[in-house]
Amino acid sequence: MKISLEEALIQLEEIKVQEKLEFRQQFDIDVNGSFWHFCQYLDKEFFIDDKVILIEYAHILQEVSRGNILKLIVNMMSRTGKSYMTTMWCLYMLGHFPQGSIMRNAYGDKLATKFSRDIRKVIGLPGSNLEVTDRYHEIFPGIKLDSRQQGVYDWALDKAKDVSYSCSGMTGAAKGQGCDIALILDDPSKDEKESISDQMHEDIFTKYLMTHRDRKANENVPEIIIMTRAHVNDITGKLEEIEGLVDNGGMWHKLVYPALDDKLNSFCEAMKTTKYLQHEREVYRKANQLAIWETQFQQNPEPSEGYTFPVNELQRFTLDELRLDSEDARYITVDFADKGNDFLSAPCGKVYGKSVYITDVLFTREPAKITEGLLSKLFFKFLPHKARFEANSGGSLFAEMVKRNISNLINTFITILTSSANKHTRILSRSGIVIENYCFLEESEYEPDSDYDKFMKNFTTYRNDGKSKHDDAADSLAMMVDVVGISGIRTTVKSYG
């Protein structure tokens, strides 16, 4: 049976569509890793397999696609491709669900509209001729913009029920109709100068509650927040405090990628080299701006003011400066780890007149059966004249175990006391003495991630408002003030036995 030229062209087009549909199957939402393959197909030069962090992020977004994750926070330093991958995910989801809608907001309109333009450009604007558009249509044939709705703040696909994509800045008037695919907040903080402002973060969180969070069509619409940390009270900090993380019985899944790991190696060599990141850290250190480094690179924000023991107010020393064997006394105080996530903190202080030099520290989360041995070894090494253990929450039994280990070998006078005073009040009331009379090792004198390093980070980030997650280092030093006193009284213990 003969067919007309017009019918033949229609059949040819149907064959092409079928071929494209078969090609698309390899990117189906239910196929493991398919979203990462989709990213590689659209931009194989950027999405390389060596970028293991982006692969992990892709797999997490895949879980969001499947409905296994409803609330996701991603914290990573800037210029790593996290927003670019999120743009890819928007393209991926609109390809699968062309009738649905996404809302993606940012700090300001300029950034929000940039994300919007990037997505429209790939889908294909009238008259455009991009290779990436052809690749996208090979996977998702028939996806195109509705010619009646192509605005930058909101636009629609021709199959959409309403608006397919909408966006706005967190500091401007609310725009957009809502969403049923995903609600995304991408980079909610503007810059370092404004991001240190408590008031700005309060304003942004209020905006988040009033005009962003309530735009989901229903409670099963996933919410994604992608940001570089800016402040302890930024949106990540607020949501972690209010709604909690899944690991602790809360609501939010959280991915955190510090630029340097505990051994000062890059989180991903293909994205940022160890050499580059270590150099940048050194620049921040020499500029006395490690707090900014910790926040924006390590994703570990702490308040820039309100510390009880500011780093720049502490007295420092090197071991070469100490007068060997001429100290008046040696003390150890032990704050027992009474909770699973607390540290056992045991600073060692050498007293010279009214000055106390913290020369050694045991600072660990290891269980008591291990710390008993570690602390006993520290006693043998340091040979303290006096030691004090806090008896609260198992500390008394722990102290007796250590006392038994050392009793016949060194002559240390040990006291075990129960404290009924409020820890925060005790720390604040003794803070002036610590700042004036206590000396701590220079940073170059101890290794990164050593017990001393962890102790100093814990100590110097203790907050005046008492809201610090851990008070172990500060409390153990407050105990030492009580033991040593202010006058630097010489010990009566003359022999180690």
Image (tube, rainbow, N blue to C red):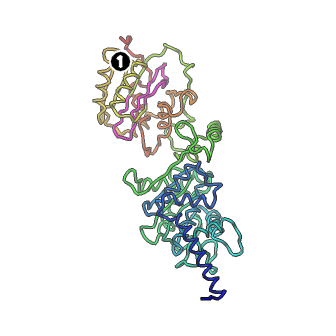
Instruction: Name the spot of residue 326 as percent of width and height, x first.
Output: 49, 13
Q: Residue at x 56, y 37 (%)?
A: 264
Is 382 displayed left or right of 231 in the figure? left
Q: Is residue 175 visible?
A: no
Closest to the observer, 387 or 271? 271
Closest to the observer, 449 or 391: 449
One can see residue 397 in this view: yes
Left or right, residue 357 beside residue 45: left
- The type of residue carrying mark 1 is Thr
Q: Relative to residue 230, is residue 113 depicted above or below?
A: below
Residue 334 position, x and y percent, is 37, 29
Q: Secondary structure at mark 1?
A: loop
User: Splitting the image into 4 quarters, where does residue 291 fall?
Assistant: top right
Task: Tell me which residue sits at (37%, 12%) in the image.
Answer: 496
Task: Using the image, determine if residue 75 lies above or below residue 311.
Answer: below
10 Å crowding of disc 1: few (<14), some (14-19), many (20+): many
Instruction: Give how far across and how far down residue 356 sits, in percent.
Output: 48, 24
Q: Is residue 347 magenta?
A: yes
Q: Which of the pair 216/494 is nearer the observer?
A: 216
Q: Quadrant of the N terminus?
A: bottom right
Write the start and end of the magenta stretch as one range: 334-362
The residue pinned by badge 1 equals 412
> Is-magenta flag for residue 168?
no
